[in-house]
Amino acid sequence: MPARKTALKEAPARAAERHLFGTDGIRGLANEGAMTPESALALGRAVTFLVGQGKSHPIRIVIGKDTRLSGYMLETAIAAGICSMGGRVILCGPLPTPAIAHLTVSMRADAGIVISASHNPFGDNGVKIFGSDGFKLADETELAIEALMQHPAGLGARRTGPSIGRAEKLEDSRGRYIVFAKNTFPRELTLDGIRVVVDAAHGAAYKVAPLVFSELGAQVTAIGVKPNGTNINAGVGALHPDHVRAEVVKRGAHLGIALDGDADRLILVDETGQIIDGDVVMAMCAEKMRLAGELRNNIVVATVMSNLGLERALNAKGIELVRTAVGDRYVVEAMRQRGANLGGEQSGHIVFLDHASTGDGIVGALQVLALLVRTGKPVSELARSAMVRLPQLLENITLRERRPLEAMPLLGREADRVRKRLGSEGRVLIRWSGTEPKLRIMVEGPDDELLKDLVGRLAEAARKDIPG
């Protein structure tokens, strides 16, 4: 099958020339490196200059953030950079990343900027940028931003007098997003009688997530909704779903919803306490959309990290799985190229392109809840029938330097041996993280014990190639 052949390809190298931007914007330790106020101001100026090319109107840029303490510092610096170039800033405060993408389009803004390090610890921060169409910027545009940040002479003269821009707060930003999210849930349905547990990770969705589900009729237990600037993602949310699992079982809830710090990804927990990742969510929704004639071109787009079980389940139903490099921006890029409307990542970024231009944890949860209400079946049954997961083991190892994989001969030879050992019954994927200084080794196969041995061999070979 063509999809099987595609699945065995490793992620291609993307935009190696970029130094600041990774697979999902810029990230780093707040107040150091690329995440200083000085860098943030330079970024605000560069973005305003680029999106203003060929336009005669004052440039408008929407800014949102998560709940990190450093968000105040970076928000102010970026806004100052925009204003110094004559741009108008629309401040939205703490809001999910997909909310900023939505507001950028609905307000006809020229760009949207999100200040968030997503699932990273609170000490980090980052920046994601959306174009006027609500989609993340192309690699080439990010490269141009970097060049202007490093060589500001290309920006020309700063604005003076009445040409300096201004900033204003969008008072009803939360309400606008809540209305948008609710409108992705079928109008003929309600969540009356449905019990859900929502964990907002003390992050950007701490206000809006509980309201979306409760306003649709659900009985909501909200946790992770008391941010203090330093507790985002700390033992809660999509990275730590045990809290949701415990509450679901304790309260007899129908579904647990765990979001990450900027709420663009979700992990679900069924009524029995079993964790449901992005692969299973895609499998469930793909079948529902196919049967309803809503799955465009019978294609689902996922990354090289998605489980082989997802591919087999979709292929069995006549659905093609297209794989991309890791990063939801690459998933969306492939979706637009192939005319697909469903895609995502195992980690929980799920993109419903008919509703949103980027991953949205709240919107994704609503689609699963609609399936639950329509079928009357428990989520555990829907998940079990959607796909059978192949055992998968992922190990992240930190090495003293980042070296191209082709320059690691011992790892390459060991990887060839592992692939030969697995044959058609598994996969091997080795890649450098796009957001952390780690080598990621993933192996899938028929047996957990075998995977431990194979991953151990690969990790040992990598450490020999780059000794500590």
Image (cartoon, helix red, strand yellow):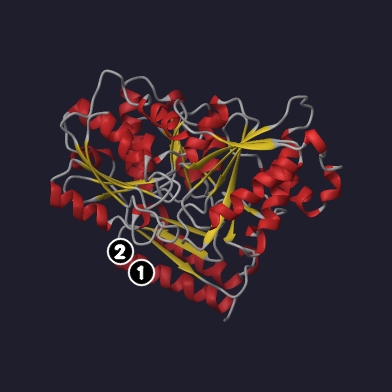
Label 1 element class: helix
Q: Residues within 10 Å of mark 1 (few under 14, many from 20)?
A: some
Residue positioned 85% across, 45% down in the render: 154
Q: Using the rendered view, name the quadrant where residue 361 is placed.
A: top left
Name above or below for residue 422 compared with residue 180: below
Q: Which amino acid does label 2 sit on?
A: Asp
- Camera-nearest residue between 296 and 188: 188
The residue located at (51%, 63%) in the rendering is: 123
Q: Position of residue 400 (x, y in %)?
A: 59, 75
Label 2 crowd bin: few (<14), some (14–19), many (20+), radius 10 Å? some
Q: Nearer the viewer, residue 149 or 371?
A: 149
Q: Are marks 2 and 1 in contact (CB under 8 Å)?
A: yes
Question: Please, what is the three-letter code of the amino acid marked with disc 1?
Answer: Lys
Q: Mark 2 points at which residue?
A: 448
Residue named by callout 1 = 452
Q: Is residue 219 left or right of residue 170?
A: left
Q: Residue 31 carries which label?
A: none
Q: Which of 418 and 303 is in front in this view?
A: 303
SS category of the residue bearing label 2: helix
Q: Report, in whole angstroms, how far the alpha carbon at label 2 lies from the one at label 1.
A: 6 Å
- Quadrant (top left, top right, bottom left, bottom right) of the C terminus: bottom right
